[in-house]
Amino acid sequence: MKKLQNKIALVTGASKGIGAAIARQLARDGATVIVNYAHSREDADRVVSQIVQTGAKACAVQADVSNKSEVKTLFKTIAGKFGHIDILVNNAGVYATSALADITEHEFHRQFDLNVLGLIQCTQAAVEVFNPAGGSIINISSSVTSFTPANSAVYTASKGAVDAITRTLANELGPKKIRVNSVNPGLVETEGVHASGFFEDAFRQKIEAITPLGRIGQPEDIAPAVAFLASGDAGWITGEILVIGGGLH
């Protein structure tokens, strides 16, 4: 039997990039996957189609997780369709580079509202519909909290908050048999990273030069670790921060 057989998993921000790879991996390991998206229905449907073609089960559900009312609707839909969830992957996020002098109040709130508040709101709602037997929450943070690149103050701060929340909620939710861990990817080639400015040639070359494994990552490098943390194989692991960055910390 596959290690996630009969599990219900929600992956936020799963229409592309790391989230899409995670959704596909969880499905390969037997889970029924809810592919959450904020705007791109077409991309989410493509991920669902890829999963269904393998014989697994998936559906797409829209919600901007930074919006509390949309989060409530998302979890009401999930409860009505599936009854509960066993796995929550808080992947939805946004990033941008900016020198200190150029940081704006709008950009601060844009990143914190999704990266931090959205994670909290999804976790609050998920706890109410988690399987009584417990389950697993995996937060997707970033290795920027370890190597703190210049011009990333807001993004790094938001992901530092994710790391702190992960450890705090591991303590808080442990009695409910809900494990909480964080996966912190290094530089991974996605559509969002290309758009953010993190992937301009000089920065990419610098990161590759200081990465022990000598390359940047792909979404498929991240997904198997998430599936492991979601499974019973990680049944005594909680409150951990796993950096997956080719050895760069």
Image (tube, grey):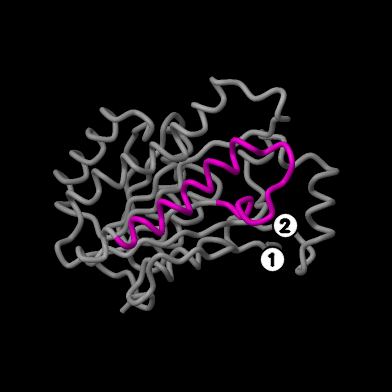
Is 4 drawn above or below residue 108 in the view shown? Answer: below
Q: Residue at x 64, y 56 (%)?
A: 146
Of residue 67 and residue 217, the one placed in the foreground of this image is 67
Whole-percent x, y for residue 212 in the image: 77, 68
Q: Which residues are magenta?
A: 142-171
Q: Is residue 219 magenta?
A: no
Along the line of sight, the residue nearer the viewer: 81 or 180 = 180
- Which image quadrant for residue 121? top left
Q: Which mark is residue 200?
A: none
Q: Residue at x 32, y 65 (%)?
A: 179
Helix, strand or loop status at disc 2: loop
| Amino acid at circle 1 | Gly
Q: Secondary structure at mark 1?
A: loop
Q: Quadrant of the N terminus?
A: bottom left
Q: Dot 1 corresponds to which residue? A: 246
Does residue 159 belong to the magenta stretch?
yes
Magenta segment, principal secondary structure?
helix
- Give the image location of residue 205, x and y in percent: 84, 51
Q: Is residue 24 above or below residue 148?
A: below
Residue 233 x %, y %: 37, 78
Asked if the residue under mark 1 is in contact with the one under mark 2, i.e. CB atoms within 8 Å, the reply is: yes
Mark 1 crowd level (few <14, some 14–19, many ≥20, 10 Å Cα): some
Total numbered badges shown on the rendered structure: 2
Q: Which mark is residue 216?
A: 2
Residue depicted at x 35% and y 58%: 137
